[in-house]
C-alpha cells in the first residue's frame, strides 16, 4: 500500500503518466524483484511504457521502453541498461562508440579537404602558370 502511495506522490502533477502495477506477464513485478525501487508507467503523451525509479533524485524517470508491449524483452533491456551492474561496461561502450565517431569525423574532414583541394587544383595551377 505504501508503495502505491509513494509512486503516486512521485508522479503527482503528471496526469499523462499512468502507473502499471501488474501485467499479464508480471513484468512490473519481475522488474521489482530485480530492483525494488523500479516501477512501470504508461506515458499517454508518447503512448510508450517507461520505467521509473523511486531511488532517483528529482525526476523518477529512468528509461523509455523501446517496445510497444511489455514482455520479457523489457526485463532484459532494463537489466542491460542497469548502471549499477553494468556501469563500467556501458561507459566503455560509450567511449568505444565515441572513438569510432571521432575517427569517422576525422576521415570525413580529410575527405572534404581532399575534395576541395582537387576541385581548386587545376584553376590554381592554371593561374600560377599563366601568371595572372
Image (cartoon, rainbow, N blue to C red):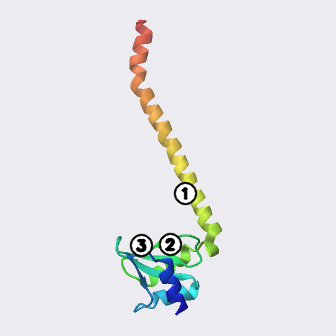
Which residue is located at x 47 percent, y 77 percent? Answer: 11
Give the alpha-carbon distance from disc 1 to disc 3, as whole Å: 20 Å
Q: CA distance from mark 3 to mark 2?
A: 14 Å
- Do residues under tags 2 and 1 come within 8 Å of each other at their CB atoms? no
Residue 12: x and y in percent read 46, 77
Marks 2/1: CA–CA distance: 25 Å
Disc ID at residue 61: 2
- Crowdedness near tag 1: few (<14), some (14–19) or many (≥20) residues, C-alpha within 10 Å: few
Could you say whether the residue bearing mark 1 is in a helix, strand or loop?
helix
Task: Name the residue at 44% across, 36% down.
Answer: 112
Q: Nearer the viewer, residue 92 or 39?
A: 39
In front here: 12 or 99?
A: 12
Residue 31 coordinates in the image, percent (x, y): 52, 85
Query: What is the number of the mark on residue 97?
Result: 1
Whether pointer 1 and pointer 3 mark residues with C-beta atoms closer than 8 Å, the reply is: no
Residue 92 vs residue 78, the one in the foreground: 78
In primary-sequence order, the first of circles 2 and 1 is 2
From where the camera sits, is residue 82 visible? yes
At mark 2, the secondary structure is strand
Q: Residues within 10 Å of mark 3 (few under 14, many from 20)?
A: few
Q: Is residue 30 visible?
A: no
Q: Do the numbered discs 3 and 2 sit on residues whose CB atoms are within 8 Å?
A: no
- Give the number of callouts: 3
Disc 2 crowd rating (10 Å Cα; few below 14, some 14-19, many 20+) is some
x%, y% of residue 113? 47, 32
User: Above or below — where is 107 with respect to 39?
Assistant: above
Query: Which residue is pictured at 42% across the width and 27% down the height?
Result: 118
The residue under label 3 is 66
- In the rendered view of the protein, which quadrant contains the C terminus? top left
Amino acid at each position: 500500500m505504501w508503495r502505491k502511495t509513494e509512486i503516486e506522490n512521485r508522479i503527482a502533477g503528471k496526469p499523462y503518466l499512468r502507473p502499471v502495477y501488474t501485467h499479464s506477464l508480471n513484468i512490473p513485478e519481475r522488474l521489482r524483484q530485480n530492483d525494488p525501487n523500479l516501477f512501470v508507467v504508461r506515458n499517454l503523451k508518447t503512448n510508450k511504457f517507461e520505467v521509473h525509479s523511486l531511488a532517483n533524485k528529482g525526476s523518477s524517470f529512468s528509461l523509455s521502453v523501446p517496445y510497444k508491449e511489455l514482455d520479457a524483452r523489457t526485463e532484459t533491456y532494463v537489466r542491460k541498461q542497469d548502471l549499477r551492474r553494468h556501469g563500467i561496461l556501458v561507459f566503455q561502450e560509450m567511449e568505444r562508440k565515441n572513438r569510432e565517431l571521432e575517427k569517422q569525423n576525422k576521415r570525413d574532414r580529410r575527405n572534404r579537404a581532399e575534395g576541395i583541394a582537387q576541385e581548386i587544383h587545376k584553376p590554381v595551377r592554371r593561374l600560377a602558370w599563366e601568371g595572372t
